[in-house]
Amino acid sequence: MYLLLAAHADGAVIQELTAAGLPSPGNPEPRIIRRNSTGESSAPGKQPSATGLAAVVRELEKRRPRWIWHRTQDWYPALLQAGVELERCYDLALCGAILAHSEFTAHTAYAENAEKLTQDDDLQPPRVLQPPPPPADQGALFDDPGLRSEPRHTLDELRTDYAAQQEALGAASADGNRRQRLQLLLAAESAGAMIAAEMQHAGVPWREELHEQILAEYLGPRPPLGHRPAKLEALNSELRRLLNSPSLNPDSPQELMRALHRNGIEVKSTRQWELKESSHPAIEPLLAYKKLSRLHTANGWAWLDAWVKNGRFQPEYVVGGVVSGRWASRGGGALQIPRQIRGAVHADPGHKLIVADASQLEPRVLVALAQDSTMAEAARDQDLYAGIAAKGFGGDRGKAKMALLGAMYGATSGEAGRLMPQLARTYPRAVGFVERAARDGEAGKTVTSRLGRSSPPPSERWLLSQRSTSAEEQRRADSIARSRGRFTRNFVVQGSAADWAACWLAELRRRLRTLRADGSASGELVFFLHDEVMVHAPEAAVDACIRAIEAAANAAKELLFGPIPVEFPVSVAVVDSYDHAK
DNA sequence: CTTCCCAGCGCG
DNA sequence: AAAGCGCGCTGGGAAG
């Protein structure tokens, strides 16, 4: 059953559709849910409109429909706020973006139409950005889901878009299961959107007093607003003395650079690794200052005030925020929680954090993509790098790792660059695969992830550079082309790893829901970071959750690659506190 | 004053 | 030791 949910000038509107996106013959009329019209008496603290729509959706969910809507972010957070969890959806915006650019559907009307729209866009002034969504706590009233601005998409527009997307999907070329893969990607992307909203709703368990303890340890007591904490101030005084610069502000790279030069420290930048080259007595306190200053500005008391409420850190995840299919995030730097403060991430009483990460995901994905049986053999080892080191690198794990990472990132110089021929000799297929992606990118072609997410077309810069005439221009053109080559080289691996992770996450969510539906203790997904998930679970549910995580990883591999002899092991840690994982 | 970009560093 | 991919956030600093 397919239910389209759209914003209506007067509230919301729901229509049942066929799989192809036509109005359902048995039930063709859309149903309008007006604000304040569904008869539920307003509970204190809740607006009737909220209960109204939420109640209707909850009732319809019993028929286990697939909800089709423009953007999950417009509807689902408010539904969750109202206590309504849904099983599955189809996110038109996310799926449409994939279909508009995928090589698998490049020949379809949908892609051509999208292409035209993009060109039209170029003629128009830049689109006004959506205002940022209100903070989660303001969404609690669930006043106008999808109606924060005038509805830009009518029911018919959305229905037509869905039908067109299904048609494009149906027209995807059948060779090598491309259509099934793309369909899987759309399902995983939509599931991801729901998971993002659910994780945002749940939040990461965060103990404020533990965070404060950590800050006090590193920085001293909380300073008055706009002041440096004691330990930073002490380091600052020391620096001013050692560099003979009584008014130095070490937060200014320019000032700092001048002060260093005045003292004979000849660096070209103030980056850590370059500063480490020098043995001047000011370097050590300077590095300490930078480290602590980073903690204070990025994850200090101000951060804690802004982002942690009621023991939860609730960032917003941006599914589809990275071209490769990785997620981005907004607010609080959710994907950059530094190791220093992970001790503040702490399970609730009676609960555990289950932190699982896919070990060496990207090289394993490369092995599977390239079908490199020699490398697959080597990767049997739980430690892939050790296995590869054993064959081709005389057992030197460090070299094997650097070579493989270099191949995936496009290293040209340094030790990684020098190791490339050695890697190519033993593993020609794996190296050939990324080389091919690089050559394609340099030539302006598109590359595509395993499930069908394609790289963006060449940039304006790339196109312009193709017309270069002089030798100087040609050199620049080559450099731009190589840069694109490095991007596409990495795209196929990073993008396919993101495909895998999306399936892993969706499969895990399904299993956790099944556990809950069966009445067993279950856990809650609370964090996701490219190749790592965190489940917050009552102790009784830990074993079942671990099995779910492992089964989901295995399922993801099968979904992407079928029964191939490459393992995707996950390492699992059951901890009270995030800093004890890994 | 606001708006934008950069340098630097956090994460994978 | 410090190249080679993808992000977000901060403060400083230049531009408007």
Image: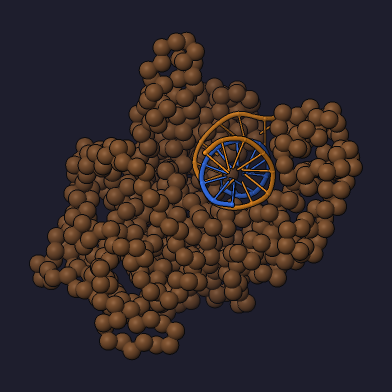
Chain colours: A brown, B blue, C orange
In this rendered view, identify the residue nearer to me: A212 or A178: A212
Q: Residue at x 48, y 28 (%)?
A: A483
Indicate left or right for A438 with C10 as reference: left
In this rendered view, identify the residue nearer to me: A499 or A276: A276
In this rendered view, identify the residue nearer to me: A117 or A441: A117
Q: Is residue A497 visible?
A: yes
In this view, which residue lies farthest toward the top?
A: A471
The image position of residue A146, as x and y in percent, is 33, 65
Q: Residue at x 59, y 71 (%)?
A: A309
Indicate left or right for A555 with A262 as reference: left
Q: Is residue A575 visible?
A: no
Q: Quadrant of residue A381?
A: top right
In this rendered view, identify the residue nearer to me: A362 or A380: A362
Q: Quadrant of residue A12?
A: bottom left
The image position of residue A90, as x and y in percent, is 30, 59
The image position of residue A54, as x and y in percent, is 33, 77
In this view, which residue lies farthest toward the left?
A: A25
Indicate left or right for A155 with A577 as reference: left
The image position of residue A108, as x and y in percent, is 20, 41
Q: Residue at x 64, y 26 (%)?
A: A415
Q: Residue at x 44, y 24 (%)?
A: A481
Q: Quadrant of residue A65?
A: bottom left
The quadrant in which the C terminus of chain A is found is bottom right
Above or below for A519 versus A94: below
